[in-house]
Structures are given as C-alpha cells and as structure tokens.
Image (cartoon, grey):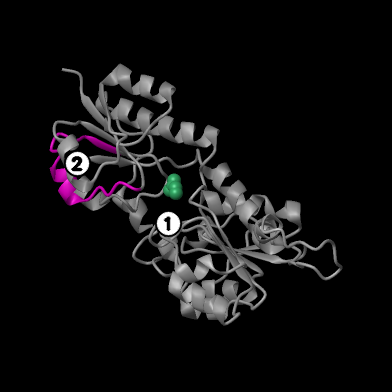
C-alpha cells in the first residue's frame, strides 16, 4: 500500500505531482474544521498543512500513523511541536525560501505608511483630491533615519540588507547571543531600539515570550514620529494597545500584514488613515509560494523514504 498523505490546501500541480510519486494524496481543499481534519488524518502517514490549521495533540492523536507534519510556512506556532516530538512525529517548516518575498513586502509597507500611498489611493478613489499643494499629504523621508529591526533572523537581516538603498541606519534588538552578531551589525536592547528608531519592524517568531512584545509600554517608548511595521505574527503586537497609541498620537502610524485574530482586524485600526492594512501577504508571490509548497513536499518525500527531514523544527530551535 502506498503511504497516504493529507494535504490541506491547494498546491501547485508540479508539487502535487511530486507528492503523487511517493504516495496516495488526499487533497482536502474544502476547508477543514478541526473535526473533519481529525477524520481525514486517520490512516495518514504525512500531513502537509498551512498556518491556519491547528495541529494540536488532539489532531495528532487522530493520526497515529503520522510520521511528518510539513507546514507550508516558516512560522510553526500553529503546531504543538512538543506533542509531535513526544509522538515521534517530525515537524518541518519552510525557512529560507520566503525570506526575500517577506523582506520585499516589509519595504513595501515601510514606504507605503511613511509616504501615505494607501491613504492617497483611497482619497483619489473617493474623488476628493483637489490637486497638488505644497503642504498636502506630507510624509516622512527615510534617508538618514534609523530602522530598528526586532529579531535578527533571516528575514530581519534581509530587511536590513535593503536599508542602505534608502540611506537608513539599521539597529537590531535580538535575544540571540552577541556572538551571533555579524560584523558591522549594531545590537541594542529592545527598549533603546524603541526609543531611538524612526521605523520599528518586527521579525520575531510568535512564542510565549514574544506574545504582546509590543504592548502599551513598548508603544509609549517609541518616538511620536515613528512607525511600527509588523510582518511577523499578529499576536506579537497588542492591537488594542496599538489602537490606543495611535489615538493618543504616541506614534505616527503603523503598517500591518498580520493580525491578532485573522481574518478579523481590530475595528479601531480599520478607521485610522495612518494604518496600512495588508491581508497576510508576506510570502505571497508565485515564486515563493511554489517554493514553499515544494520544500514541504520534499520533506515528506525524504521522511517517507526513511531519511531525516530537510528543514526540521526542533525543540532546540523553539527554545533558542
Ligand atoms: C507565513 O506567515 C509564514 O510563517 O510562512
């Protein structure tokens, strides 16, 4: 009997073909509830899933033959990795292949919020633009300003690598050890980064330590002229606190690709012209989404062949 593989999302045909070479694919593109996910996991040896699938201990128990959970995402906060490890199930993610796409979107958001392009687009569509004026819709220039990057992983560093094109100085706040600091990289405590940066961009995974990392206190430390960018995970920012900080004019604006309760957005943020909202598109390019699905499939391929996964998520990487 070929191994059975559950795939919870539409995937490119080339990736489906790759999986069909190694097993029987059950393509569940009809929107699985936790209950139907559990039903469909019965008898499966591999699961290819996405960040909107909650793979907790109950789901894992519904698939006692599972050998691998291959998440098509770099983040894996939707999976109980400890529960998977204790059941001998590999968990894999898709690091590396989405770095450039997310970095590019981050820059799109930085430019959009500081130069008010989404706001200007809405204004033109409402037919209320009266024409050019010297003092109309002024924003903040990036050149000579400080970009504070929270998290010095692949994506944070890829965002930093593009900063010199805009003449920005980059500083990092990161929990990783000093010896991981690359030559020329400036590290500082988060509090100092918040106080001194003109743009603060978040690039940390969601963990119990980073949930609401940006809360009222953190927002109150930022410059009143500064902007907050989040392309990491929604719950890293306390949206109610962000709405409060914008109301109190404690910061100049925010650009968000991710939200605390997707697809819901805090109603206060929806009303604010100085907030750019994007529906979780960080990795959403044709090239990257194909590469992500393909990497997940390659992980399944090797694990079902009895080899170690290519990009495992380990307990150690959760703790680091
Ligand atoms: C998307 O948000 C990802 O983690 O890949």
Horizontal side of 304 relative to 261 (left or right) equals: left
Magenta-drawn stretch, dominant element (helix, strand or loop): loop
Q: Does the segment drawn in magenta span residue 123?
A: no
Tell me the residue at 64%/74% (across/down): 196
In the image, is the residue at mark 2 within 8 Å of ligand 1 by its beta carbon?
no
Q: Is residue 184 visible?
A: no
Spot the residue most to the right: 134
Horizontal side of 143 relative to 287 (left or right) equals: right
Disc 1: which residue: 205
Q: Nearer the viewer, mark 2 or mark 1?
A: 2
Quadrant for residue 49, please give it: top left
Horizontal side of 298 relative to 254 (left or right) equals: left
Say which of 126 and 214 sits in front.
126
Q: Secondary structure at mark 2?
A: helix
Q: Which mark is residue 131?
A: none
Query: Magenta stretch?
Result: 52-69
Tell me the residue at 34%/45% (across/down): 313
Q: Does the segment drawn in magenta span residue 53?
A: yes
Q: Position of residue 151 (x, y in %)?
A: 51, 59
Cα distance in 3D space between marks 2 and 1: 28 Å
Q: Is residue 21 visible?
A: yes
Q: Position of residue 15 (x, y in %)?
A: 40, 25
Q: Secondary structure at mark 1?
A: loop
Disc 2: which residue: 36
Quadrant containing the N terminus in the rendered view: top left
In this rendering, the count of numbered labels is 2
Tell me the residue at 38%/38% (across/down): 311
Q: Position of residue 113 (x, y in %)?
A: 65, 61
């Amino acid at each position: 009997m070929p191994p059975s593989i559950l795939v919870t999302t539409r995937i490119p045909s080339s990736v489906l073909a790759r999986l069909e070479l190694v097993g029987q694919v059950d393509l569940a593109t009809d929107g699985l509830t936790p209950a139907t996910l559990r039903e469909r996991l019965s008898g499966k040896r591999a699961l290819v899933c996405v960040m909107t699938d909650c793979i907790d201990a109950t789901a894992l128990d519904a698939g006692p033959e599972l050998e691998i959970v291959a998440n098509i995402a770099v983040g894996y906060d939707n999976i109980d990795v400890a529960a998977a490890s204790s059941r001998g199930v590999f968990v894999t993610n898709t690091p590396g292949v989405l770095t450039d796409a997310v970095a590019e979107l981050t820059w799109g958001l930085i430019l959009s919020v500081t130069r008010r392009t989404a706001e200007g687009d809405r204004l033109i569509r409402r037919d209320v633009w009266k024409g050019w004026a010297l003092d109309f819709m002024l924003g903040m220039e990036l050149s000579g300003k400080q970009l504070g990057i929270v998290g010095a992983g692949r994506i944070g560093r890829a965002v930093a690598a593009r900063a010199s094109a805009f003449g920005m100085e980059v500083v990092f706040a990161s929990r990783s050890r000093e010896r991981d600091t690359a030559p020329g990289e400036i590290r500082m405590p988060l509090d100092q980064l918040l106080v001194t940066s003109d743009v603060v961009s978040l690039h940390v995974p969601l963990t119990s330590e980073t949930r609401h990392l940006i809360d009222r206190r953190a927002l109150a430390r930022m410059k009143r002229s500064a902007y907050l960018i989040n392309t990491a995970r929604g719950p890293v920012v306390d949206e109610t606190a962000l709405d409060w900080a914008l109301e109190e004019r404690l910061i100049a604006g925010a650009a968000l690709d991710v939200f605390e309760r997707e697809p819901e957005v805090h109603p206060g943020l929806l009303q604010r012209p100085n907030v750019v909202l994007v529906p979780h598109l960080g990795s959403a390019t044709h090239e990257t989404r194909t590469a992500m699905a393909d990497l997940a499939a390659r992980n399944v391929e090797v694990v079902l062949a009895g080899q170690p996964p290519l990009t495992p998520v380990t307990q150690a990487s959760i703790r680091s």
